[in-house]
């Protein structure tokens, strides 16, 4: 990197980390963003707005943040001039010491990454967790050692520019339509996800979901050793599955089943979380953690905030916060996690979603829907006649009305199937407001 002219595109958390990292290695760093950036990074030239792409032709390497589309015309032009364009994860992975255990998928990444990180750390392995989950991979480089397990949550955006990224264990949880606005087509989105194993060889492991046909196809395209997890099949060739209500692991074809933990010990709600635990069990066994140790770690795992997180029981009613359920599929998974008696809070900013998909489950399990936010009218229209609908407008009203209506033994669930940006800063803010409203009920 010494004296190399490098342009960092995007001045978010990972862009800033990349700029600092490159500077420390002697590069001549320019960092740019379409938006204004008021801070200074000593030693880094900052270009924003109209000046963003100034001097592009002189750069020798371009490092982009996950939020920056690779198809940006200026980046296309740079590639045309022979300037390599890579992402922050790709750059970091070239310097990261130790092993990488990388997890991707459309849903469940954060939950599974957090769980695998806990299992490995509990087992005494030197572990650090990062990627899409919060700490940029770039920031893990300095603390990595040859013994470190780097457990990484990797999004499809971060895979777009992967070239040499080479995890020893890769996991694909599921692939369902998402972010098609960015990737152009579902086929392209699948291709991006498959880059997670592009560099793997016969010494590496790839963990795939046997119940998801889009991830199954990856098995025919990899050189690595494929292991499976399944929440639905009676058995997989090698990997993790459920046998007589116990999660078991088969280390090789034909080998005996190793019991890992009974389903009743999983402290998370929902069949989707069983899938996440199965994937984590498989990955952790491949990393060398014993079944006994995995069992203890899973038993003491707590739901990640805003992911079907238990908030409180107030006068016999259980409150759950699944603010991260920002699409219809995640809401269906949340509703399916409870047998019935659900008071469901739906709404927010619509993403062109089809809410009629919820009709059957709602008819079966949901007593009342409380709508909030700008999508309320559309949701009300698409679900008319399915179940009782209360137009609550705000989250505070919704919690109050649900608390009045819910009987002991019933559930109040925030799983809104929408983005939050109409009434909140983000899903985290929405979840915190929900939890505060619930805490308010407790003191009444
Ligand atoms: P990601 O990091 O991929 O967005 P999260 O663990 O943050 O995944 O969960 C996102 C949403 O999807 C939450 O509402 C959660 O309850 C739901 N979810 C979690 N795991 C799964 C899964 N395996 N399949 C479908 N939905 C899931």
Image (cartoon, rainbow, N blue to C red):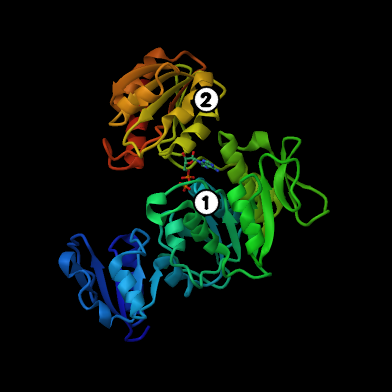
Disc 1: CA contacts within 10 A as few (<14), some (14-19) or many (>=20): many
Counting from the top left corner in percent of width and height, residue 234 is at: 75, 40
Specify the quadrant that holds the N terminus: bottom left
Residue 423 image point, x, y percent: 26, 35
Asked which secondary structure carries label 2, the reply is: helix
Instruction: Identify the image quadrant of the C terminus.
Output: top left
Q: Residue at x 83, y 50 (%)?
A: 256
Residue 202, x across and y down, in percent: 68, 69
What residue did someone put label 2 on? 361
What residue is shown with label 1?
105
Whether residue 211 is visible to the viewer of this picture, yes or no, is: yes
Q: Is mark 1 within 8 Å of ligand 1?
A: yes
Residue drawn where x is 58% and y is 45% of the image: 276
Q: Residue at x 72, y 39 (%)?
A: 246
Q: Secondary structure at mark 1?
A: loop
Specify whether 310 is left or right of 249: left
Report the front residue among 335 and 98: 335
Cβ atoms at labels 2 and 1 below 8 Å apart = no
Real-space Cα separation, disc 2 to disc 1, in angstroms: 24 Å
Q: Quadrant of residue 248?
A: top right
């Amino acid at each position: 990197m010494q004296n190399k002219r490098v342009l960092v595109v995007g001045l978010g958390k990972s862009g800033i980390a990349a700029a600092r990292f490159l500077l420390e290695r002697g590069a001549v760093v320019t960092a740019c963003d379409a938006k204004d950036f008021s801070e200074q990074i000593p030693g880094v030239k900052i270009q924003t707005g109209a000046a963003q792409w100034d001097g592009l032709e002189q750069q020798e390497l371009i490092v982009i943040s996950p939020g920056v589309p690779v198809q940006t015309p200026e980046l296309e032009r740079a590639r045309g001039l022979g300037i390599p364009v890579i992402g922050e994860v790709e750059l970091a992975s070239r310097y990261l010491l130790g092993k990488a255990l990388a997890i991707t998928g459309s849903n469940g990444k954060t939950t599974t990454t957090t769980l695998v990180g806990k299992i490995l750390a509990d087992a005494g392995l030197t572990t650090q967790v990062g990627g899409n989950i919060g700490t940029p991979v770039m920031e893990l480089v300095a603390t990595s050692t040859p013994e470190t397990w780097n457990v990484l949550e990797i999004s499809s955006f971060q895979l777009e520019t992967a070239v040499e990224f080479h995890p020893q264990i890769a996991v694909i949880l599921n692939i369902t339509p998402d972010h098609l606005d960015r990737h152009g087509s579902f086929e392209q989105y699948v291709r991006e996800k498959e880059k997670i194993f592009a560099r793997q060889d016969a010494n590496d492991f790839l963990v795939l979901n046997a119940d998801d046909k889009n991830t199954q196809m990856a098995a025919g395209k990899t050189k690595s050793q494929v292991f499976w997890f399944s929440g639905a099949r009676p058995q997989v060739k090698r990997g993790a599955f459920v046998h007589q209500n116990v999660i078991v692991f088969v280390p090789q074809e034909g080998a005996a089943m190793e019991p890992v933990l009974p389903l009743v010990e999983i402290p998370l709600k929902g069949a989707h979380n069983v899938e996440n635990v199965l994937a984590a069990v498989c990955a952790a066994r491949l990393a060398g953690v014993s079944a006994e140790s995995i069992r203890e770690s899973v038993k003491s795992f707590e739901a990640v905030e805003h992911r079907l997180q238990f908030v409180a029981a107030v006068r016999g009613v259980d409150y759950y916060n699944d603010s991260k359920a920002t699409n219809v599929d995640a809401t269906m998974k949340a509703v399916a996690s409870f047998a019935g008696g659900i008071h469901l809070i739906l709404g927010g900013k619509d993403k062109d979603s089809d809410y009629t998909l919820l009709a059957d489950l709602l008819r079966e399990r949901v007593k009342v829907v409380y709508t909030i936010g700008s999508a309320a009218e559309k949701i009300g229209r698409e679900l008319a006649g399915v179940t009782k609908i209360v137009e609550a407008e705000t989250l505070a009203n919704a919690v109050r009305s649900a608390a009045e209506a819910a009987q002991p033994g019933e559930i109040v669930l925030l799983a809104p199937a929408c983005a939050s940006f109409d009434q909140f800063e983000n899903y985290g803010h929405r979840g915190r407001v929900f939890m505060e409203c619930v805490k308010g009920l407790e003191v009444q």
